[in-house]
Amino acid sequence: MNIEEYISSGVLESYVLGLLPETEAWDVEWNAQQYPEIRSEISKIEKALENYSAENGIQPPPDIEELVQSKITETPQLRYEVERQASDDSSTKEPRSRLFILLSILGLIAFATLSFLLWQSSQEKDKIAQEYKTLTESCTEENNKQNEIISILRNPTNKIIAMQGTDKAPDAVATIYWNDIDKVAFLDAVNLPSPPQGKQYQLWAIVGDNPVDMGVFDLPDSTNLIKKEFIQNPAAFAITLEDEGGKPNPTLEEMVVIGNFG
């Protein structure tokens, strides 16, 4: 027998991979018992495959090894073959057992991977459904706000007081929607410049000759109206730029808009 030619024929690689028919696999095992060179070459091939698998293998999803082990434990025939394969001497290994274990473990890995992908897909669907629900609720909330604004703007009993910019802020514009029937007042900060750090806008109602504080406010992120305290019998409205938190009396030099009632 030409051992070198036999080794270079590729039959040993096919044997290690479990691809040979049973009779040819028996021949390889018999030759391995007779010739140490063949037995040594089989060990080298197995070691090379192990190293290649370790260096180039794709990392399986978490818990795959645990799942495979549990499936082996739950399958009596497969558990028996694995235990027998581990305890048998190389001279008594059956090629059918080698192939059976290889195919079974590959099948279990495929099953576990598919299960993981299905679980991942389910999680992704749940995430999308939750995001859709959140978006829908946000849109509904925003739609309700816009409908409320439209309702306020269209209310025929509103009195609309337009406040124009002063010399301090010529382009500034703000509007008051004042309703004596519903006893409500809304401020629309149409175009007010962003206040400096540490400053806040403050709304005033002029009742008679006296300014009445209607509270400080921050500029809204959108076109939302700002609900303010209702004041009876105003003669005018004005907005000043005050220190953060407001003041009991307006700083006239810091007035940015003013508008007369009626």
Image (spheres, rainbow, N blue to C red):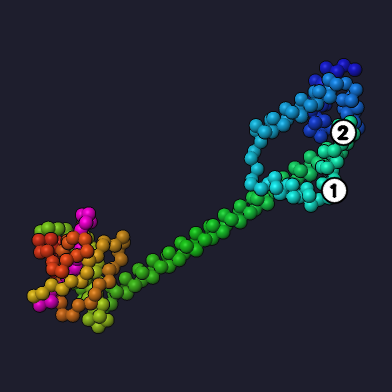
Point out the tag, 2 or 1, that comes first from the N-terminus. 1
Q: Which of 232 and 42 is in front in this view?
A: 42
CA neighbours of label 1 inside 10 A, class few (<14), some (14 to 19), many (20+): few
In the image, taking residue 44 as reference, residue 219 lies left or right, namely left
Callout 1 secondary element: helix
Q: For the residues carrying marks 2 and 1, which lies nearer the camera in this image?
A: 2
Q: Residue 11, percent across and down?
A: 82, 26
Q: Is residue 157 visible?
A: no
Q: Residue 91, percent across and down?
A: 89, 31
- Cα distance between the residues tagged 2 and 1: 20 Å
- Amino acid type of the residue tagged 2 in the rendering: Asp
- Amino acid type of the residue tagged 1 in the rendering: Gln
**Magenta-drawn stretch, dominant element (helix, strand or loop):** strand
Does residue 158 sit above or below 221 in this rendering? below
| Residue at 13%, 61% in the rendered image | 254
Give residue 187's mark.
Answer: none
**Highlighted range, magenta:** 194-208
| Residue at 79%, 52% in the rendered image | 74
| Residue at 68%, 46% in the rendered image | 64
In the image, taking residue 226 as reference, residue 41 lies left or right, namely right
Q: Which of 46 and 89 is in front in this view?
A: 89
Does residue 240 sit above or below 54 in this rendering? below
Q: Name the residue under label 1.
A: 77
Q: Can residue 13 be seen in this view?
A: yes
Q: In this figure, what is the number of numbered marks?
A: 2
- The quarter of the image holding the N terminus is top right
Q: Is residue 23 magenta?
A: no
Residue 262 sits in quarter: bottom left
Residue 179 sits in quarter: bottom left
Q: Name the residue under label 2.
A: 89
Q: Nearer the viewer, residue 219 or 248?
A: 248
